[in-house]
Image (cartoon, rainbow, N blue to C red):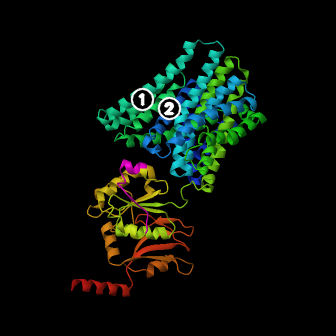
Amino acid sequence: MEILDSLLVVLMVIIFLGIFSQWLAWRFRMPAIVIMSIVGLLVGPVFGLINPEASLGELFSPLISLAVAIILFEGSLNLDFREVKTFSKPLTHIVTLGAFIAWIAGSLAAHYLAGLSLEVAFIIGGLFIVTGPTVILPLLRQAKLKSRPAAILKWEGIVVDPFGALLAVFAYEFIKFAGGTITLEEFLLFFGASIFATLLGVGVGWGQGKMLERGMIPEYLKAPVLFAVVLLVFVVSDLVMHETGLLAVTAMGIMMANMHIASINDIRHFKENISVLLISTIFVMLTASLQAETLLAIFDWRIIVFVAAMLFVVRPLSIWVSTIGTDLHWKEKTLIGWIAPRGIVALTVSGYFAGVLTENGYQDADILTALTFALVFSTVVFHGFSIGWLAKKLDLAASDRPGVLIVGGTEFSAKLGESLKNDGVETLIVDSSWEHLRFARKLGIPTYRGDILSEQTEYSLDFAPYPVMIAATETDAYNALISSNFIPEIGREMLFQTAPYRADKEDYHPSLGGIVLFDEQADIYSLNSRIVRGHVIRKTTLTDKFTEDDYFKTRPDKSLLLYIKREDGSVQFWAPKRKLTLKAGDTLVSLAPPVKEMEKAQERISSMKNQ
């Protein structure tokens, strides 16, 4: 195993395993954090292939701290206050009263069940209120909840994350003050440092935002400069008092998120990619660095009982009590009261306090690492595997069958939407013109009036049920703009557009647009013209006797394939550059010319109009 002693090789293995775990989780639809944790345990304490903490030495803790700061800042960049207008009251109750209840109840559980002294229990109890973005965001990405419970869990995880660490520091400082180790002035320094961290984050965030708005930073330097400033703010604040850096970067991110900077989306996409890389890497680093003794210690009956109490008593109690008098539905309370995975912040900060408290004579602090890992791993596994199932049982999950959002209110869009709706696919047609949406309204298709690219639409329209988007407006450039804007969020494989009309398809770089639908010549004008001429949507189901070859031999020459409805009810759109395999049970949906009788009727109607 000498090759794995090389620092370069260890770093390569950690990064590769982290990203491979993410891909594996996506491929088999499993919780990513569970896969990352298991992979780290296998290569670390189980088989002893790597030990990142030993290999990195003194760099281990600083690297993790800086990574957590970046992840927390990236998460807070998404905390726009306009998002919470429909659930501000329950959210406020959860992050204040709910966090307090979780601290007190968790501390008592740690004392009476895990056997910790009251002093150590109240320190670690404050830390255990955190459900940070390193664990909650991957879960939300995998579970695809409805927008409201997902947003509440996201906000709670990001806002409470720094406060959990600060609460542990506060409890530690208070214990030292009560024991006469420090003076009142030194104890009050904690509050001063917290206020300083908040003001520092807000001030630097405002300054950075103004520089971005006024073009004082060139485009190619915006993300790198912001990246460097985040690290600077974190380190400066943390030097004043340990763990206040997390509060500073969170305040900075929230400040910038609510300045509504035009270029913030590009920066956010860059930092999302960095965050995925960092989350994957540090989860493997932490679990691979655990000792075998720590793994064995988690099977102590006191630790098992403590973890069970945190899962089934403390968390539900804090949510149900704190949300009394709010409009949170019992289903939402049940889901939020169950989902509370702990992650990187809990592991790293508990490791810090384990060392500090042991040095100060608290011998029971030596089980903090095992206790924290038991809670982290249990919540990651139980919540990771149950969130999707529970959300479906409570009807709080987005539909298993991906909905389709069509941008452009035309006659063809309305007909396509009607066909999809009849096939059980949730469909929404969006257009900025109320008049354009009249075709969809007549057919009973859900509509939304507004510009798909406006900020108002972003915060008033729930995109969660519609992972598939079709840009089908009558303006080629606007379709390309829609595609380039939503590709980072939806992914190119789920974003489609009708063929260009006036513009040559070579005028647009492939990276700007979505997948061209149906046919290279099927622009929105020709599609609408077909509907006006009486073309209808036909559905033909393949069987063992009527095969794919039979269909293509007998279908009308002028028919246009739209999509395939699979036997399981899923839908795949037809595209000229996409090869789709067909089998018995598939239903081919096409836009076909009318039968001869309808063609004659159309001719008679046309001749009467010309007389």
> Residue 504 appears at what percent x and percent y?
27, 61
Q: Is residue 556 left or right of residue 181?
A: left
In which image quadrant can residue 468 be found? bottom left
Q: Is residue 85 above or below residue 506?
A: above
Q: Earlier in the sequence, mark 1 or mark 2?
A: 2
Instruction: In this rendered view, identify the residue nearer to me: 106 or 269.
Output: 106
Instruction: In this rendered view, identify the residue nearer to me: 484 or 401.
Output: 401
Q: Residue furthest right?
A: 301
Which one is closest to the eye, mark 1 or mark 2? 1
Tell me the residue that label 2 is attached to: 69
Residue at 46%, 42% in the rendered image: 273
Q: Tell me, for residue 202, which label it has, or none.
A: 1
| Residue 93 on the magenta span | no
Q: Is residue 490 above or below residue 265?
A: below
> Residue 57 appears at what percent x and percent y?
59, 25
SS for tag 2? helix
| Residue 449 on the magenta span | yes
Which amino acid type corresponds to the residue marked 1 in the rendered image? Val
Q: Is residue 342 above or below residue 207?
A: below
In which image quadrant can residue 56 be found? top right
Question: Quadrant location of the C terminus?
Answer: bottom left
Residue at 54%, 56% in the rendered image: 398
- Which segment did they paint magenta? 444-459
Q: CA distance from mark 1 to mark 2?
A: 15 Å
| Residue 340 at least partly seen | no
